[in-house]
């Protein structure tokens, strides 16, 4: 299924008509540079173009009051003086004779996007709109926003499609207080927002934007605020919050639809955010959300004021929505102290509400660390007053290719090759010496068992993945252990870093070594006698790989952080026979791992696992995995296992950290 792109240049036909140093960054060019970039890169043509529509009064009244709507309706007929007068009653926003029309189109665009996703016309989509929405409140415009596009879309989706749970992810660098107020007592809409806060010193300077505002009454736990108390946050900081807060909670919440307040002022270069995350981080943030809700994801533009990083970030988002493998996460240096403090505070504030946070550390009793942070902050600020905000420069995100052959499959003759894949059995280019060497090396007690025949094909497939002719591969083999050993040896010689994810017990000694060329993460049910090493992580789950929530918790909070920090060039995913993993969980794992190694995933499965082979291939092709049921609480033993491993490994792998080290 396709990806919708909703845009209409009518939304560029309003602008600031007077001098205002706060609002002058919200310009029509914000939309035109994004649309032009999508056209130039060919991404727009790969999307399904869906027309905008005006939101009706009924749509707008889902969130806003009648008196506010009636007041805004008068603005098209106002003189310049009346517009300025009208604007004075609100904060950080401006009006224009055509802004009411554009605000209806922006909200209507979000609703068109919801309709096209919910009716199955498309799987995902992005609406490029202005004015933005997430600051506007029931009876007030605010922060360049007139109608709350995403809040209206959430209410609309619940009402029209009877959805029980909607997740709103707000990665804009400002707190969408309008959304928070709308749903703070509503457990059916989980609102997650990170935002520049600086201990309430940054706009909109609200006490209720801090981590301890968790929602009210029945909505307690369904409002997650992640304050950034420092500027300069980087990719590691954003990813840590996804791995250790948003994703575990989102999988437990199990939304029917994901809406994104896609503001890109959280990217490097933005004058409002002053953060340092690179535009390609949005490829990963998007990818990590795409296996929720069966892939039903609607991204609606909010902020973003740097006319270079904004279009780059939008292109990264749309290309990932289209299913293209994400770029390498690059060298992640781990979250900074301030981010770890925020992470710690948010996890402990939400501990009572989410079983995945059951073992989160409690708040530091003496707020020593954050006092420490504030003190450091004050001294820094004094120094900073003198220096002017230096121009940020960053590399253009590398061009992402959509691979000619997305998935190559090594299959027994009697298994048909699904559409979109290529059957792979060629061993041309392999010299006969290699083939005979493989035979003698791997043939047990001389019998020429047929699994030997696949080894040369596996070796050839790994070669073609290394030279990017092929992106991902899957092999149905008779002896998965032998195939794994052979593949690891060959791959380790070709790729600098190979992540091996082994699901189930291995019959023989682990192939991983401690030289860092391979990182083995093994999920099994048996008590591990194997030592835990930096590059060898045995995850022993109480009920083995068959327990959905324990397994998913380990994937989200342990495997993904490790994988992203390791940044492999190949992911080898091995499903041992009899491992007991649910096919739906296996598909989630396959989908999530696509975010690594630019989608270079090689899957090894035993032939008899044929039933789940087609769904697995679907994930290799970039399709979303089906939604899991709402995750219940992981078993205490499993959560403790993850905590134990995290504690053991966080010195080596910074992305596993969830609290700041005690101040010396
Ligand atoms: C959609 C949005 O979240 O990007 N709106 C941002 C509004 C910013 C208002 N002024 C801030 C003043 C401090 N620099
Ligand atoms: Zn913003």
Image (cartoon, helix red, strand yellow):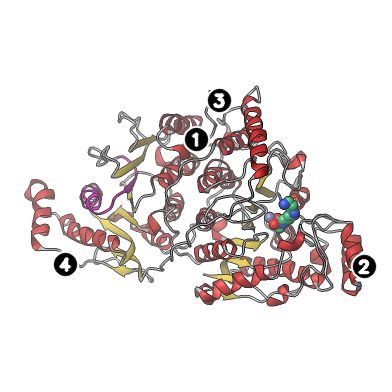
- Which residue has dot 4 on it? 429
Point 63% across, 75% down: residue = 50
Mark 2 or 4: in front is 2
Report the number of discs.
4
Q: Is residue 533 left or right of residue 1?
A: left
Point 61% across, 45% down: residue = 231
Tell me: is circle 1 under 8 Å from ligand 2: no
- Which residue has dot 3 on it? 663
Q: Which class describes the residues within 10 Å of circle 3: few (<14), some (14-19), or many (20+)?
A: few
Image quarter for ligand 2 equals bottom right
- First reached walking from the N terminus: tag 3 or tag 1: 1
Answer yes or no: do the residues labelled 2 and 4 have beta carbons within 8 Å?
A: no
Disc 4 from disc 3: Cα separation: 58 Å
Disc 2 from disc 4: Cα separation: 76 Å
Q: Is residue 370 left or right of residue 533?
A: right
- First reached walking from the N terminus: tag 4 or tag 3: 4
Residue 363, percent from left and from top: 63, 28
- First reached walking from the N terminus: tag 3 or tag 2: 2
Disc 2 from disc 1: Cα separation: 54 Å
Mark 4 or 1: in front is 1
Label 1: element kind: loop
Point 52% across, 62% down: residue = 316
Disc 3 from disc 1: Cα separation: 15 Å
- The magenta stretch spans which residues? 484-505
- Which residue has dot 2 on it? 82
């Amino acid at each position: 299924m396709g990806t919708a792109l909703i845009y209409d240049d009518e939304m560029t036909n309003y602008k600031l008509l007077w001098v205002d140093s706060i609002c002058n960054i919200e310009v029509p060019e914000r939309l035109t540079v994004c649309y032009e970039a999508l056209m130039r890169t060919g991404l727009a043509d790969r999307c399904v173009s869906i027309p905008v529509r005006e939101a009706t009064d009924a749509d707008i009244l889902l969130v806003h009051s009648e008196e506010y709507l009636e007041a805004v309706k008068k603005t098209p007929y106002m003189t310049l003086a009346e517009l300025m007068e009208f604007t004075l009653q609100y904060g950080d926003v401006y009006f224009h004779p055509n802004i009411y029309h554009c605000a209806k189109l922006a909200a209507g665009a979000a609703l068109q996007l919801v309709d096209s996703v919910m009716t199955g016309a498309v799987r995902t989509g992005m609406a490029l709109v202005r004015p933005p929405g997430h600051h506007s409140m029931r009876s007030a415009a605010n922060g360049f926003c007139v109608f709350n596009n995403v809040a209206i879309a959430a209410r609309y989706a619940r009402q029209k499609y009877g959805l029980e749970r909607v997740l709103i992810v707000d990665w804009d660098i400002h707190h969408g207080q309008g959304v928070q107020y709308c749903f703070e007592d509503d457990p059916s809409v989980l609102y997650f927002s990170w935002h520049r806060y600086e201990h309430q010193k940054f706009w909109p300077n609200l006490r209720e934007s801090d981590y301890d505002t968790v929602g009210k009454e029945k909505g307690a736990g369904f409002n997650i605020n992640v304050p950034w108390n420092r500027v300069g946050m980087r990719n590691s900081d954003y990813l840590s919050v996804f791995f250790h807060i948003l994703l575990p909670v989102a999988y437990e919440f199990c939304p029917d639809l994901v809406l994104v307040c896609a503001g890109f002022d959280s990217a490097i270069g933005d004058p409002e955010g002053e953060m340092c995350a690179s535009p390609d981080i949005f490829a990963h943030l998007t990818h990590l959300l795409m296996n929720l809700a069966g892939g039903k994801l609607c991204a609606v533009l909010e902020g973003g004021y740097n006319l270079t990083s904004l279009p780059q970030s939008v292109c990264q988002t749309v290309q990932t929505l289209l299913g293209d493998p994400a770029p390498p996460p690059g060298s992640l240096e781990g979250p900074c102290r301030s981010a770890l403090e925020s992470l710690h505070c948010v996890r402990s504030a939400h501990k009572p509400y989410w079983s995945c946070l059951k073992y989160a550390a409690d708040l530091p009793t003496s707020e020593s660390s954050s006092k420490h942070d504030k003190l450091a902050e004050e001294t820094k600020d004094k120094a900073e007053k003198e220096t002017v905000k230096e121009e940020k420069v960053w590399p253009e995100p590398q061009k992402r290719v959509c691979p000619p052959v997305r998935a190559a499959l090594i299959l027994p003759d009697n298994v048909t090759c699904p559409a979109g894949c290529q059957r792979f059995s060629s061993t041309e280019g392999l010299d006969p010496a290699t083939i005979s060497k493989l035979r003698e090396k791997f043939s047990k007690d001389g019998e020429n068992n047929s699994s030997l025949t696949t080894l040369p094909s596996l070796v050839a497939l790994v070669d073609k993945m290394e030279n990017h002719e092929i992106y991902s591969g899957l092999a149905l083999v008779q002896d998965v252990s032998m195939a794994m050993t052979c593949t690891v040896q060959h791959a380790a010689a070709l790729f600098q870093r190979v992540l091996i994810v082994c699901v189930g017990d291995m019959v023989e000694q682990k192939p991983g070594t401690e030289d860092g060329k391979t990182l083995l993460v093994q999920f099994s049910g048996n008590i591990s006698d194997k030592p835990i090493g930096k590059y060898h992580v045995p995850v022993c789950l109480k009920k083995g790989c068959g327990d959905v929530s324990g397994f998913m918790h380990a994937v989200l909070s342990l495997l993904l952080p490790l994988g992203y920090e390791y940044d492999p060039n190949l992911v080898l995913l091995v499903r041992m026979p009899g491992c007991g993993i649910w096919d739906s969980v296996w598909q989630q794992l396959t989908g999530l791992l696509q975010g690594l190694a630019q989608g270079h995933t090689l899957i090894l499965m035993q032939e008899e696992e044929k039933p789940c082979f087609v769904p697995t291939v679907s994930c290799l092709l970039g399709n979303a995995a089906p939604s899991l049921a709402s995750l219940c609480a992981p078993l205490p033993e499993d959560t403790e296992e993850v905590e134990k491993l995290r504690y053991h490994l966080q010195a080596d792998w910074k992305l596993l950290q969830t609290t700041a080290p005690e101040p010396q």
